[in-house]
Amino acid sequence: MAECETKQYPDVVTFAFWIRKASTLKLKERFYKEDGNICLGRGMAFHIAPSNVPVNFAYSLAAGLLTGNVNIVRVSSKDFRQVDIISQAIGRVLNKNEYRVLKPYINLVRYSRDKGINDYFSSIADTRIIWGGDNTVAEIRQSPLPTRSVEIPFADRYSIAVIDSNVYLNMSDKLRIAKDFYNDTFLSDQNACTSPRLVAWLGSRKDQAKEEFWANLHELVEKEYNYQSIMGVNKLSSSCLVAVAYAAVASEQPGVLIQHMADNRIVRVKIPKIIDGLMDLKNNSGYFFEYDCNDILELKDICNDKRCQTLAYIGDRKMLVRLLQSGICGIDRVVPIGKTMDFDLIWDGFNLYERLTRIVSVG
Amino acid sequence: MTYDDIISLLPYSLKREEKEQLLTERLMTLTEHHRQKCPEYRAILNAMQYNMDRVQSYRDIPFLPVRLFKELSLKSVPQEDIVKTMTSSGTSGQAVSRIYLDRTTSANQQKIMVKIVSDFTGSSRMPMIILDCPSVVKDRRMFSARGAGILGFSIFGAKKIYALDDDMKLDVKILADFLERYKDQNILLFGFTFMVWQHFYKELMRLKGEGISFDLSRGILIHGGGWKKLISEAVSQEEFHGRLKDACGLERIHDYYGMVEQTGCIYMQCECGHLHASIFSDVIMRRPLDFSECDVGEKGIIQVVSTIPESYPGHSLLTEDEGVLLGEDDCPCGRKGKYFQVVGRLKDAEIRGCSDTYAAKFQ
């Protein structure tokens, strides 16, 4: 952490913070049970990290290591400096005498798409963790696993946000909220599975809340986000396609409305209702569907989809209860805005601790 | 003024104010026509909260991203009036644009193209050498951009030959015979920039090494399709001209800029090396950040407007090319209107995210 270069990479800093001793001990407290049974790593964990999230491999490795597994981690084939920083740090620790014993447990590998290598690592894996979405999962599944091995597949997901306008307007630190929401979205080009794509507004002061919320966010995006020229064209194309999709299913007026903004950094499209297939029209890098919600159950359809992952909120958690208990098949996480990217051993609906261990039940 | 009256005007005859008035009137009429006849276009205008009363100039008319024609079938005439469907030449697997033409639009494309090109080549037809293979234009029901370009320009040829065979090899005998027969006349050559370089220029140089050379000092070459492939070979426009002159004495060389979505309104390169907008169309350079209009000399995304499209809503389009406006009404070649330069394609966005392959539908 002392190194200057590390500080240039907030994702590396966040990982370092997550893996610090106090937080690791807290994980132990939450997951490790002294109940007379014996809990062991399943054996070898084969991780396929995503190509576009530099630090993800480290979280995956940490999960495998904390649960007592030997790990083979395929890191992104892209040349990310963050990968070097973390792997060099790991290397330094492993070269100390007292940690040499851990060496065989940590194997970071890098190779381009190669079925032969996937086949081999899969054939000796007890757990296979596949990041990278539907296509990568489908590709890796071409390589068979031994019969008793388990798999943790991370599929393509989408996420949404729910904001109670009255609560938001009463909050004192709106700049911090903007920063939190920025971290949830723009920090990963709004293209992580956890990034909200839809913002649903509740409460009685929606218009005023929207105005302040987006103005604060815009100010931050202007300062911090690297806007690329094609992004405005991409977002305009999406808006046109959304307009056409709505006209095809609902002829009543008004249809969707592209909200006026000063520039293309944030594009908001107000939708009159939630239609099937809305999330097939999503875009990234600052592209939001907005919905005025009068009853939380109006969000049932969009949450009743196995692709729906995280619900981020501002307001009283209780407002979500009816939705969460309505029998929906989506939503695996409910977190306050600002926390969507916080990694945990319960992730994407899986308990990684359980998946990566076996229990010797002692009667 | 009817559209036929407009077509009868000289293509580079109007000054800024006159052209602005003409374009504004015609493009507003087209906008209203497409709004009434094309439901998808109407839905998009509604989403943009378009209000005709607020349009002061054709610059205020909304533009559609050109890639929408790859995603949607956009027509403003009944299916039975469609006489031709043009497609862009995408490589296999890529989505292609589909442009639907009725009799009027198709005829106007041809008339206007003749007016524009004649301004550079003179109005009499010439013997013509097509620097491509005959198979490109075989299937007349489906016009690829390459085929459409060849057929479009073929109207300037009195007697035509294809200089390449279907293996893209230069047919030396056909070329030699043709040049011998028409040695006292100006000769029109047409081809796609990369083909001209790869299959014509390079072959001429090879033949020169064997002592075979051709005299094309009476030739006029028109080429288009973009420099993307040649930039990877590090060939600049100046070098392209210089080397062709050395290879075969060819001096009159005109690049052009155009796209299948606005066939007819091509932008020809004048003797000073500038691309020119005729009175039938225009370019507006837009700032990527907010789509406001660029100043002269400032690089922006090229918006193209055309007075031709009646059968599909393609009269105002945002391309994915970048260009620079060099000036208006004052090119030393004497032609009125804007003159500009195309810088290249917008770069695809580099985007983070969990899913390894994403936004495939737009790539």
Image: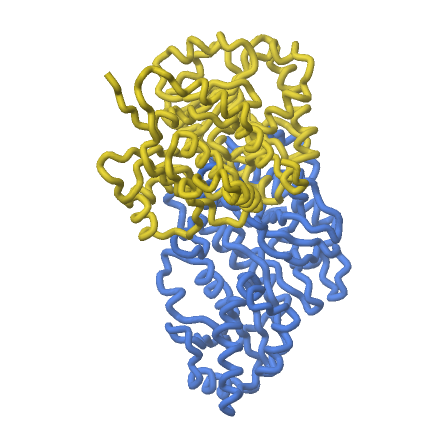
Chain colours: A yellow, B blue
Q: Residue at point 57% right, 46% down? A: A81
The residue positioned farthest toward the bottom in the image shown: B211
Q: Quadrant of the N terminus of chain A?
A: top right
The residue positioned farthest toward the left in the image shown: A147
- Residue B359 x %, y %: 46, 41
Left or right: A66 in relation to B125: left
Left or right: A146 in relation to B181: left
The residue positioned farthest toward the front in the image shown: A97
Q: Residue B314: in sight, yes or no?
A: no
- Residue A124 x %, y %: 29, 43
Question: Which quadrant would residue A324 be assigned to in this image?
Answer: top left
Of B282 and A105, which appears nearest the observer?
Answer: A105
Of A4 and A315, which appears nearest the observer?
Answer: A4
- Residue B253 x %, y %: 61, 72
Q: Quadrant of the C terminus of chain A?
A: top left
Of A149 and B177, which appears nearest the observer?
Answer: A149
Q: Is residue A57 above or below residue B165?
A: above
Q: How many marks?
A: 0
Q: Residue at point 62% right, 47% down? A: B303
Q: Residue A276: in sight, yes or no?
A: yes
Left or right: A280 in relation to B322: left
- Residue A294 x %, y %: 50, 10
Q: Is residue B348 above or below residue B243?
A: above
